[in-house]
Image (spheres, helix red, strand yellow):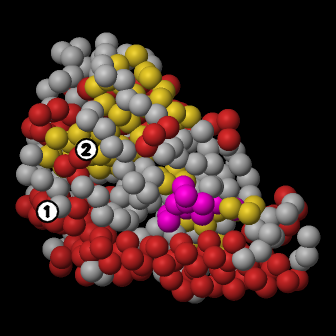
Amino acid sequence: MPERVFNFSPGPATLPYEVLQQASKDIVNFKDSGIGLIEISHRSKEFMAVIEDAESLLRELMAIPDNYKVLFLQGGASSQFFMVPMNLMVGKKATYLNTGTWSKKAIKEAKLFGDVDVAFSSEEDSFNRVPKQQEYSVADDSEFLYFVSNNTIYGTQFHEMPETEKMLVCDMSSDILARKIDVSKFGLIFAGAQKNLGPAGVTLVIIREDLLGKAPESTPTMLNYKTHADKGSMFNTPPTFPIYIVAEVLKWLKAKGGVTEMEKINREKAALIYTAIDATDYYRGHSDADSRSIMNISFNLPTAELEAKFIAEAAEIGLNGLKGHRSIGGCRASIYNAFPREGVVKLVEFMKEFEAKNPA
């Protein structure tokens, strides 16, 4: 096997090497059972132990209160764009904050089920920031306030969660477990696993119990949160391998010191890159300074030609996945929990060398 590269991809993203090593063994011979992980029955005691481990560790690491259900679903985070309003706002109103591509898509889906009040949008400014608390208000008749905590494409993040008397619903796909949050302030949290939790294929939903059963009777069975809560995420065959990886990643995270220690590491990694960007006019960060993400750092060079050269030469030395999203171009470094500090240091060194060799 060639030497592993540093994977800055935004998702599917890098996973802890220890987890990959363990998975490579278990996929062939799970716990010395003579059968591979992806072959065992989802009803077997072996897999039931896996999904119970995943939920237990998640509850511990996030301090999830007892009156919340943890669901392991399929369909990606994008399915939650319609499942949330389908279950929680049919024929009613909800307030949305439009801070990027994923919130914009969620707004489109929500409009199929009720009245959507878009209380803030940074679209005219290429989604370069998230709002301050005083920049929006939540309608009195809204069922909830919906927002995306971290925007992968534009590199923005809510540093403080919105304060409102209304229920919070949040897409935390790209920064879940990257920093401490108070779950009790939310009615529902969801996250696609393929950034900070595991591989693509499983979507995490954390939902307050009193919200179950609010869906209209016309809601399809598979799209009703209560269906999955009542069956412990086992109404149908769950994505067994991704759930196993999530459990292993959570074990890794706990061994590293949990969310508190991981937040410290994440902030240090991000600060290294932002310091390099701010030290020169050669690199320009996309997001406003007070909205900067600690997970996804989007930036530009003086010209598109230099950006293409930067990305190509970075890949040659093992710095992969730095191409920015097609909607804004430029470069993007995604440095989720499992991304090693050594890769960030190497990127910063390369940025300095590239600028010196390629003046604008």
Disc 2 marks a residue whose amino acid type is Phe
- Magenta stretch encompasses residue 132: no
| Residue depicted at x 51% and y 77% | 269
Magenta segment range? 289-299
Image vertical order of residue 296 relative to residue 120, above or below? below
- Residue 32 visible? The answer is yes
Position of residue 265 measured from the top left corner of the image (x, y, whole percent)? 42, 78
Q: Is residue 290 left or right of residue 79?
A: right
Q: Of helix, strand and loop, which one carries label 2? A: strand
Residue holding disc 2:
186
322 versus 286 height, above or below: below
Mark 1: secondary structure: helix
Q: Is residue 237 visible?
A: no
- As for residue 292 lying within the magenta part, the answer is yes
- Residue found at x 61% / y 51%: 154
Is 156 positioned to the left or the right of 199 in the image?
A: right
Residue occupying the point 29% across, 58% down: 181
Label 2 Cα neighbours within 10 Å, binned few <14 / some 14-19 / many ≥20: many
Q: CA distance from mark 1 to mark 2?
A: 19 Å
The residue that label 1 is drawn on is 56
Q: Horizontally, is 88 left or right of 118 in the view?
A: left
Which corner quadrant holds the C terminus? bottom right
Q: Earlier in the sequence, mark 1 or mark 2?
A: 1
